[in-house]
Image (tube, rainbow, N blue to C red):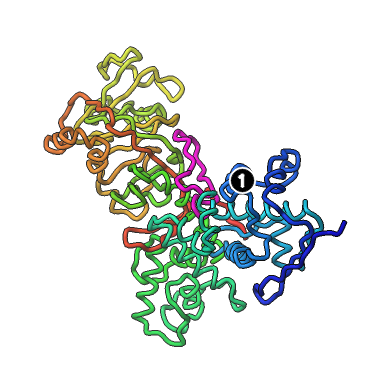
Amino acid sequence: MKKNWRRIAIATITGCIYSITITGQVTPEKLQLFLSDDIKMITLPIKFLPWVKEFYLKQSYKSVWIKHENTGIRITLLNELKEAGSKGLDEKDYSNNYTESLRHNIFTLNDLNDSLKAEIMLTDAALHFYHDIAFGNTIPVFRYDGLKYSPACQQIPDLLAEYVSKNSLSALPGRLLPQMREIIVLENKIRWISTIMKDSSFRETIVTSSKLNSQNKQLLTKLFQLGIMDSIPGNISDSLLKQNVKEAQKQFGLLADGILKTTFLKELNVPISVRRQQLNLSVNYYRWLNCLTQSQSVIVVNIPAAYLTVYRNSETIIEMRMIVGKKSTPTPALTSSINEVVLYPYWHVPYSIATKELLPAIKKDPGYINAGNYQVLNKAGKILDPYSINWHALSTKYFPYIIRQSTGCDNTLGLLKLNFYNPFGVYLHDTPSKELFKRKKRFFSHGCMRMEKPMEIGHLVLKNNAIAIDTLEQKECLRNQSPITVPADEHIPVVVWYNPAGTDSSGRVVFYEDVYGKFKWGK
């Protein structure tokens, strides 16, 4: 029997000519039979097998990639995969023997099995790539994941089948790209840095001089590499250079004074390759988040930014500064959902704070209890006279009491507290210490998260009970008012993550300090 074969010439890609020799024609019947053979499918390193089967069902099991008439769509896919890095993705994630051979060699499919495998592996690579554009290639790390959320607001197999049938595969990334402001801005910065790093003249630059003038060539180069300036000028006025330095300082979350201080030079000298890694991780975090924000409000706290953002339908509807945990008492990354709002909350002082921070002051003067509007409770919940207790007999190892702070203007939790289940005992709350929100670095808490504008969140969570928040704002702090617990109208998701980059309210990329030392960036 003569072998059924033909050679397909593929158009030039990056200056090379590619061709495929195909032996054995792939028919819908043969492709469907191959996909239904579990033993054969197990041998293939396929990541999205259910989607592959769903895709070919939509295609009536027609070959998509290796047919001669589909040369153009195959080239489009290979070019998209090659440029994955400019989207914050990793080209290696979508490489297999077939994609690499097509890109680099004259590729021969020796028999029907080879042809079927090539067809299926190219589909899997495509589905993987478009999945990552829509949903990200990285799941954020959480110490507690109460939401158990997985993004699924785009039907990738359906959309791939649709755009293949329309012969408009190049338009699919634009259709899948989430429209969150952060994703668009971060992708633009990634494209800039990727282009800079591909240039043969690119070198990592260290700025050593603190002189603010056009003679500081290292400074000019670094500002260009970061996208602060669109070229490296031969000459630039000191005033314009100072403006560019201020812009760079804003990108690093520093005071924009235009002075090349040690703190600024430290951030400036972080390698560009590391900045790209930070951007890549961040943009994929936001891609992961996007589906969750569709048709519901989502509260997101970014720990290194000490900032809260509420999203709905990919749009920002509320944002504010936050105070989060110190390095020694960090705020945990988690997901959960708001279940209740407490008005005029008690602050039940955590055991460690009561014994390590309050107890020494109480030992000196038990009047510290009344002065701070605290109460001492026994295990039965009965309020005790602080002067009746032998405080000197107590220690960090023996403390059989509960200390709580009653309501009032000095209550640590302020007027409002938002509860959501988590194993760490942390929550979102108001605070009387408003002056701390003016600081650039806001890492002062024992792990809980203090809100700059708590009433806005209160109105969001209790939208059907706005009178409760309105009354709270009118009466303000009432001393020794009993707490009032109001069930949440809507269990709004809460995401507390550790994201190394993002954008500010003006749409500027911002890199955040790794305050907890979570990241070990490689080359």
Furthest residue in direction left, as rendered? 474
**Residue 12 in the image, given as x and y percentages of width and height:** 66, 75
36 vs 392, nearest the viewer: 36
In this picture, is 181 found above or below 414? Answer: below
**Residue 56 in the image, given as x and y percentages of width and height:** 61, 48
Instruction: Rate crowding at label 1 as few (under 14), some (14 to 19) or many (20 or more) other CA atoms within 10 Å.
Output: some
Q: What is the three-letter code of the residue carrying label 1?
A: Phe
Residue 515 can be seen, yes or no = no
In the picture, residue 195 is in which quadrant? bottom right
Tell me the element at label 1: loop
In this picture, is 37 found above or below 270? Answer: above
Furthest residue in direction right, as rendered? 1
Q: Main secondary structure of the magenta part?
A: loop
Image: magenta residue range = 133-156
Looking at the rendered image, the quarter that the C terminus falls into is: bottom right
In this picture, is 361 found above or below 111? Answer: above
Write the residue at 72% across / 48% down: 30
Write the residue at 25% across / 45% down: 453
In the picture, residue 35 is in which quadrant? top right
**Residue 444 in the image, given as x and y percentages of width and height:** 37, 44
Write the residue at 56% across / 48% down: 58
**Residue 493 in the image, given as x and y percentages of width and height:** 37, 38
474 vs 505, nearest the viewer: 505
Furthest residue in direction bottom, as rendered? 234
In the picture, residue 439 is in which quadrant? bottom left
Write the residue at 25% across / 41% down: 454
Would residue 108 appear left or right of 420 to someone viewing this image?
Answer: right
Residue named by callout 1:
48
Furthest residue in direction top, as rendered? 380
Looking at the rendered image, the quarter that the N terminus falls into is: bottom right
